Amino acid sequence: MRTQDMNRDWIATARTLSEALPYLQRYSGAVVVVKFGGNAMGDADAMAEFARDIVLMKQVGMNPVVVHGGGPMINEMLDRLGIKSTFIRGKRVTDQATVEVVEMVLTGLVNKRIVQAIMDEGGRAVGLSGKDDDLMVAEADDPELGFVGRPVEMNVQVLRDLYGAGIIPVVAPVATGMDFLETFNVNGDTAAGAIAGALKADRLLLLTDVPGVKDADGKVLTQLNPDQIRAMIADGTIAGGMIPKVETALKAIEDGVRAVVILDGRLPNASLLELFTEHGAGSIIRSTESRLKSRQD
């Protein structure tokens, strides 16, 4: 590469950093819950890039909390063990044998892989599940779904203790039951929303395999409010696997989260684009009363 081209690249980098300053100041001290999932979890380069983004958030004074899924890894292990899965309304039917595999994969393989990726990028991270310190207590969501839980009690002080000590919490969505004997598989988006709500997070970022919420013509809607979301569910515009995500967003906002963003986790540096640029990325969902001019307000 010629010296002139290199200088141009460095100048562009410096300008980008300078333009990000207001957003770095805006989010200093903010709690941001990031749900990581989808196909990016199985790609080493995408995992490293995600981890680097999370470490950067922490480095500039934010308090990121990572909540992850692991559907592809669970499916792979269930297939290897000859255990068949069925889904109802986008959620896995979970019997006793399945929940044991889910806990093993999520709290072991997947959780520690993310923790290691963050540490490889220079961050400090601790992996835990919803069962640790009774972080997430759940009850059965639907008898048809078996050991699929719905969070009913959140004890998030352990997360505050961790990020207050400079450590990034990485949470597997496995919960204890009300009797503290059962184990429940909790949908990753649902778990992230419950944690964000309990922390009164500034942002909940739901990283997915789609660009965001689309209208009837397939166009991504960049800003939405709860009334619009409910209308789009009612008329069928929002359907399938997007329904649990927007329902998570609605519940999180109701519980005190400032805004929820559904964005494409396959996009390079998706979280940084959302947080540190005016345009953002994906679909931001805020309360009906919100009339803020800036996406970052």
Image (cartoon, helix red, strand yellow):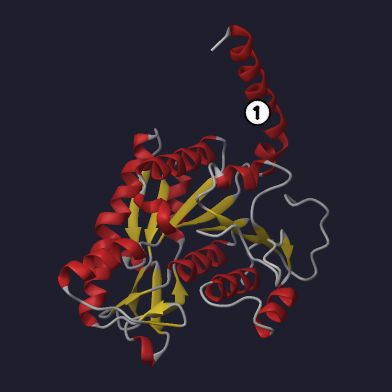
What is the x, y in percent for residue 2? 57, 9
What is the x, y in percent for residue 173? 38, 66
Q: Quadrant of residue 211?
A: bottom right
- Left-right relation of 100 to 16: left
What is the x, y in percent for residue 280? 68, 48
Residue farthest to the left? 81
- Left-right relation of 70 to 266: left
Towards the viewer: 158 or 151: 151
**Looking at the image, is 208 positioned above or below residue 118?**
below
Residue farthest to the top? 3
**Looking at the image, is 131 positioned above or below residue 87?**
above
Q: Amino acid at mark 1?
A: Leu
Which residue is identified by label 1?
17
Q: Quadrant of residue 196?
A: bottom right
Label 1: how many Cα within 10 Å (few below 14, some 14–19, many 20+): few
**Looking at the image, is 45 positioned above or below residue 130?**
above
Q: Count up the numbered dots.
A: 1
Residue farthest to the bottom? 143
Which residue is painted at 54% across and 47% down in the image?
267
Name the secondary structure under disc 1. helix
- Left-right relation of 32 to 157: right
Which residue is painted at 39% across and 62% down in the image?
69
What is the x, y in percent for residue 133? 34, 64
